[in-house]
Image: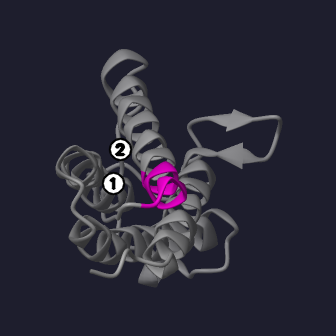
Amino acid sequence: MQYPRQWNLVFIAWLIALVSTLGALFFSEIVGIEPCVLCWYQRIAMFPLVLILGQGLAKADAAAIRYALPLGIIGALAAFYHNLIYAGLIPQDLQPCGQGSTSCAQIDLQLFGFITLPLLSLLAFAAINTLLFIASKAPRNEK
């Protein structure tokens, strides 16, 4: 990964992952919004991206993209499913949040009347995946 454009894309993906991680921690630990099961799945996919992409940037290791993309795709799928629940398109029987836990359909925060936390998560994963996919296709320096 010698090309600056490729590094810039990975750096932007790392920044998005870092802001998403800090935002998730802020909303749960400071604001007090309890994450549901699907939120935890998305966190499990997002939090390691900060370390994987950061390590890839520090060591100039293009393999970090290969390691990060599966997490990004899994996180995007969980966020997409969560958004379908918010939209009311998934029946109650197919929702992973059971009794005694925070409901996956409960809207705790809504910005501008339509932007929810799962939508922000989906957008973050989509941006990270797009950036990493483009970075993976950038030409490499031949020896």
Q: Quadrant of the C terminus?
A: bottom left
| Observer-nearest of 133 and 124 | 133
Which portion, as a residue range, is magenta? 3-10
Tell me the tag on residue 35. 2
Q: Are marks 1 and 2 in contact (CB under 8 Å)?
A: no
Secondary element at tag 2: loop
Secondary element at tag 1: helix
Q: Position of residue 42 (x, y in %)?
A: 36, 59
What residue is at 37 percent from the left and 30 percent from the top? 22
What residue is at 70 percent from the left and 67 percent from the top? 87
Marks 1/2: CA–CA distance: 14 Å
- Queried whether the magenta region covers residue 128, the answer comes back as no
Q: Position of residue 43 (x, y in %)?
A: 31, 52
Q: Quadrant of the N terminus?
A: bottom left
* Figure quadrant of residue 117: top right
What residue is at 45 percent from the left and 39 percent from the top? 15
Q: Position of residue 90 (x, y in %)?
A: 58, 80
* Figure quadrant of residue 123: bottom right
Q: Image check: 30 left or right of 64?
A: right
In the figure, 99 relative to 25: above or below? below
Q: Mark 1 or mark 2: name the one nearer the start of the chain.
A: 2
Question: What's the amino acid at mark 1?
Answer: Met
